[in-house]
Image (cartoon, grey):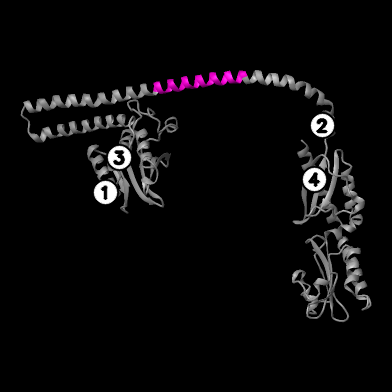
Amino acid sequence: MLAEKADIFLASLASSTDQTLQASHYLEERIVATLKSIADKIASASPELLTNEWLEQLRQQNDLKAISIYDEQGLVKIAHDSSLVGTSMPVAYDCHDVLDGRKSEHIFGFSEGVFCESDAFGIAMRLNNSDVLRLLTGVDFVLGFEKNVGLTSLIERFRKHPGVVRLDLVDNSGKSLLRESAASAPENGFAASRTFLLHDVPLGRFEVSLRDEALSDLRSTGFLAIFASCFFALFGLRLADNWLQRREERLEEMRQNAETQRRIDGLGCVVAAVAHEVRNPLNTLALALNALRTDLTEGRPSSEIEPRLDLLEQTVMQANQMVKNLLQTSRPIIPQLSDISLADSLAAIAETFQNTFAGSKIALNAARPANFLADRDLLQRLLWNLLLNAQQAGADEIMIYARPDDKGTIIEVSNNGPAIPAEVMANIFVPGNTSRPEGSGMGLYNCQRICAAHNGTIHVSNGNGKTTFVMFFPADPRGKAL
């Protein structure tokens, strides 16, 4: 609450100060006139009076930063600080125009109508003996005119705001830029500060301390009540702690029961799906064997018997793949790494799949053959599962794309089949998760395990009318423990 009040208070003060200073267009003329008056005093002084000590007295009396007199070569002859004698005129503020004779007088640090163009102000003027006098001052000198500007009265009005304990305008070192008559009380209460900018130039930093009287009264009158309530609070916390502990125990028990039930349900789905999938190839085998027995009895030629043998072989392969997927879930995957040609392996898998499933079209893009370490059998099983999923989902076009990566190889398998439902996508690699009634949900689970065994990754996405699986295989899977 106090932080919000302080922020609003400082924003209002900065805005009012900005408007007050910008409204005083005559301020520049008054400051310049004062600087010229000081310069004329120095220019008309006798040579005996022009000493380093005298210039230092003038500097202190008029809140100036520096007073320097340069010869025709731009070297300091006399200055408020004797250590500056012999040094060159700085290039800042374009005072060399007076030294070169292009100007007889140069006012710097001001912009049109606004005094605060920078944090330094001054005047350079040519003297009768061709020397150049330069006066340099800063914001604190400008604030010496705040009575004309109205800055003092403005700050005094804000100091009278209810709850204000302290209000000051300081420079970057924390020194007050206001006159001693405007000094404020020591800091007390909630402190906040805000840099005051005028045309993007820092003028100083407002510091304010606020105290909420209502809160102070509440603290003083409520101490006894708070102390008295501590006993009851401690007693209540003890009861609450016991209740929370019992509640956590009940929640943990419920969580374990729910996890156990989820595993039981998942296992039931897997068993039912596997039983269903194994029953299909067994029925196919029985029908094919009966038909083959009839063909042999009737003495049909081998050209008619051969398609039935192919069907038997494919059905056995399908059943064997189901058994492998199921066994894989309970065994650790330890890849037997070898340096294989990725392009040749992908081409062989694509050709075998197209021959097995008539009508499947696989587009392969692996023009840059790259050798990489992998388990050939696991790689074939991984890609076969992805191709089989796409074919069973209804895709008529499958794309395999392989490309090298900075740290390994990326393989993408995409298809134009239906998008994966959101509820399935959320747990796509969880065992038993499938969108097909007859599916086991073990294929993609094993795909993830194969990629992990190679220290790789696999991700899936829907978009642009296709489903894409992206796999990454590191250049050397042995970089981490398998």
Q: CA distance from mark 3 to mark 1?
A: 15 Å
Q: Earlier in the sequence, mark 2 or mark 1?
A: 2
Tag in front: 3 or 1: 3
Q: Earlier in the sequence, mark 3 or mark 1?
A: 1
Q: Most extreme residue toward the left, as rendered? A: 299
Of the residues shown, which amino acid type is indicated by label 3? Answer: Leu
Q: Circle 3 sits in a helix, a strand or a loop, which is it? A: helix
Q: Position of residue 333 (x, y in %)?
A: 33, 36
Q: CA distance from mark 4 to mark 2?
A: 21 Å
Q: Residue at x 81, y 71 (%)?
A: 83
Horizontal arrangement in the rendering, residue 223 relative to residue 360 (left or right):
right
Is 141 placed above or below 132 here? above
Tag in front: 4 or 2: 2
Of the residues shown, which amino acid type is indicated by label 2? Answer: Leu
Circle 2 residue = 215
**Label number found at residue 10:** 4
Residue 195 painted magenta: no
Circle 3 residue = 378
Q: Earlier in the sequence, mark 1 or mark 4?
A: 4
Q: Nearer the viewer, residue 429 or 70?
A: 70
Query: In this picture, which residue range is highlighted in magenta?
Result: 242-265
Provide the major secondary structure of the magenta segment: helix
Q: Position of residue 94 (x, y in %)?
A: 76, 71
Is 8 placed above or below 328 here? below
Is 287 placed above or below 457 here? above
Work out whether residue 213 can be spotted.
yes
Q: Residue at x 66, y 20 (%)?
A: 238
Q: Earlier in the sequence, mark 4 or mark 3?
A: 4
Circle 1 residue = 344
